[in-house]
Amino acid sequence: MLDIKGITKIFAKGTPNEHTALNDLTLHLDKGEFVTIVGSNGAGKSTLFNAICGTFFVDGGSISLDNTDITYQKEHKRSKVIGRVFQDPMRGTAPNLTIEENIALAYARVNHGALGKALNKQDVALFREKLEAFDMGLEDRMKTKVGLLSGGQRQVVTLLMCTIVPPKLLLLDEHTAALDPATSDKIMKITNSMISENGLTTLMITHNINSALKTGTRTVMMDEGGIILDISGAERANMKLNDLLTMYSQRSNKVLDNDRMLLGND
Amino acid sequence: MALALGSLQLGIIYGLLAIGIYITFRILNVPDLTCEGTFTLGLAVSAVSSKLGHPYLSIIIALIFGMAAGSVTGILQTKCRIHPILAGILVMSGLYPVNLAILGGSPNLSLMNSNTVFRDCIAKTGNIGIGPETAKIIVSLIVTGFAVFVLSKFFKTHTGLAIRATGDNEDMVRASSIDADRMKILALSIGNGVIAVCGAMITQYQNYADINSGNGTLVLGLASVIIGEVIFFKRNVTLGLLAAVTGSVVYRYIIAFAMRLPFFDASYLKLVSAVIVGVALSIPAIKSGISLMNTKKGGRADA
């Protein structure tokens, strides 16, 4: 499904600030896999997502999705098949557009016709039905500007926008980190049900090691732009937080420095 | 009375300029200086076409020329990654000699002996008992009203929605598989097209074209948009477009009133417009400053 082969990304190449953010990274995802990614600050997790989405082109290696080489495909073309939710709830939605307009924009991925009406009755009914399923009262506020919603509500709208046309690949970049614990739990539940309903191939960055081990089917640990640990199945099921920390220290020769990862407890 | 009617007619025609500025400044969120050049471009193109005997066609030609100039700004902004304001300035100053050449090298062109849209309509409506001033209002209303109607429909289509979202959150637009660059070019093209039509209508209305007519159009348009927002608030696009036109009419009346004051000189107009825009745009900052002051005072009172 997703096939990343030896990608490298160097920022500020040839200057004293040169920084290798991705170092010959290789990762393969099968269809329907739900992989969680953990790693310390600056390990290259978000850079990996940016590379997959095409925010920038990589300096070496190749990325292919569903047997199509997308290494040099433009960002907006890739986003037809890749959905992404950011940590910052402000990034995924347009604040001055209403909820229904935001969703219509995302729905336009399939529903073409550049000069067709953006909001027809059928579509709006579909959006309402989808929003009702979240049980957050958003279905009654479809004409509300998204800027007036709370962070959690905005993340739900973003999630719906990413999945209303099921993408081939869903990228979740600590999408619950900016929310309070109760909302965060709720969003995580919604996320899980969306992923299992549509059988989405998913990569999720999280700072919470416990939830990384509990959620999804496979866990990957990153450090200095590479993957240092890749566990799934029984090995993963038996893995405890402390085992993981020990393994991290062994493989990277340093102690984990991400406070949020260590303090996250649930 | 003549002054009142004249202000109404001009206000409605300049409403097109306000619409163009509304599209670039409010929807796309870029102050676009190209308008100073495209306004004159429309003016010049329309004058020359009318001189050649095609007053109605001249409006369409102005639209096409304006859209072309706007898309040049758009390409400079997006594909060449030039700062939006600089891109506008480049096209604006590049257009000056172009406009001069269109006018045949002279800084102005009179249409005293040519047929214009307004003269033609006045002649035709005169037969059915409509006075010339009323006819002018009707013609202006038809053109501006048509623009408002078409654009408000357009901004509710998929493409229109994508343009609005581009001005609101570009990251999100790219993530929704929309080419944000293309949307910006399209919006600048449409905005400047409407502004060129405004220039063309002004030529038709005043029967001459002047190379310096475009000076200050950005501030003028901004003032109209802002006055309109004070009256209508910011709700949706249709109301935004209507507000821009209304603001333009109100602005004309403010000017007509100011001109009657004994100490007011016509050359102050631009200063007045600039002050209106400057004050209106700083209202949010002033508001937050006042509330901070109140908070501080409240703190002292408690202590």
Image (tube, rainbow, N blue to C red):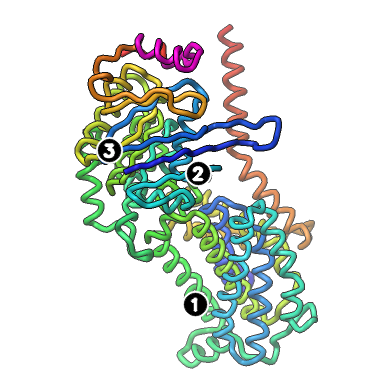
Q: Amino acid at mark 1?
A: Ile
Residue in front for this viewpoint, B35 or A66: A66
Give the x, y percent position of residue A237.
24, 18
Q: Which residue is mark 3?
A: A138
Chain at tag 3: A
Left or right: B51 with respect to B163? Answer: right
Give the x, y percent position of residue B20.
56, 62
Image vertical order of residue A218 relative to residue A244, above or below? below
Image vertical order of residue B286 relative to residue B55, above or below? above
Q: Which residue is mark 1?
A: B138
**Circle 1 or circle 3, nearest the eye:** 3
Secondary structure of the residue carrying tag 3 is helix
Marks 1 and 3 share the same chain: no
Marks 1 and 2 share the same chain: no
Residue in front for this viewpoint, A217 or A112: A217
Marks 3 and 2 share the same chain: yes
Q: Which residue is mark 2?
A: A55
Secondary structure of the residue carrying tag 1 is helix
Q: Which residues are magenta?
A: A242-261
- Dot 3 or dot 2, earlier in sequence: 2
Give the x, y percent position of residue A82.
37, 45
Q: CA distance from mark 1 to mark 2?
A: 51 Å
Chain at tag 1: B
User: Disc count in the image?
Assistant: 3
Quarter of the rendering occupied by the N terminus of chain A = top left
